[in-house]
Image (cartoon, rainbow, N blue to C red):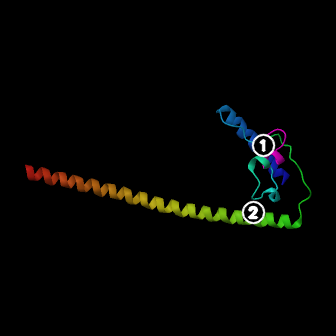
Amino acid sequence: MLAKARAAVEWCRHASEHARNIGGKPWSYVLIPHDAITASATLDALLAAFRTETPCRGTLKTREAVTEHEKMEFWQALGRLYDSSLALQRASEALQKISEGHEKRLDRLEVVQQWLAEKERARETGEQA
């Protein structure tokens, strides 16, 4: 978990550098324990409690060891997230195929419309001549 947090801190450092170059706001990584999230918790309070001294510096606040139950909950949540990601990927691929089919039909429709317009112009020209 700490390796992932370090990678996130590094990502934030790069994102902050890029944001600084384009006039954006700095990014920061805050590791908030799941049990700190409550209905009454505000974002400001959570940030005050768990933000490190310097954004994206790599210092992480630690807490007591993770229980086996928490580990199991984490892996189950990660599995659900993975399953959801796969479902979204499949849905996205299906929508892409549908979109390509519609584009092909639109191409054919434009050709037919152009042919009908030309035929109508020829008929009108033939009638007027």
Q: Quadrant of residue 1?
A: bottom right
Identified by mark 2, the residue type is Leu
The amino acid marked with disc number 1 is Glu
Q: CA distance from mark 1 to mark 2?
A: 22 Å
Number of other residues with Cα within 10 Å of mark 2, as a class: few under 14, some 14 to 19, many 20 or more? few
> Does residue 67 belong to the magenta stretch?
no
- Secondary structure under tag 2 reads helix
Residue 100: image location, x then y, percent: 46, 59
| Horizontal arrangement in the rendering, residue 55 relative to residue 22 (left or right) | right
Across and down, in percent, residue 59 comes to 86, 43
**Percent coordinates x, y for residue 124 in the rendering:** 14, 52
Q: Nearer the viewer, residue 13 or 90?
A: 13
Label 2: which residue? Answer: 78
Q: Taking 33 as reference, is 79 above or below it?
A: below
Based on the displayed image, in which of its 4 quarters is residue 37 positioned? bottom right
Task: Return the mark for residue 46.
Answer: none
Instruction: Name the residue at 68% across, 66% down.
Output: 83
Q: Is residue 82 left or right of residue 71?
A: left
* Corner quadrant of residue 76: bottom right
Q: Determine whether 20 is above or below 84 in the image.
A: above
Q: What is the magenta range?
A: 46-55
Q: Nearer the viewer, residue 90 or 25?
A: 25
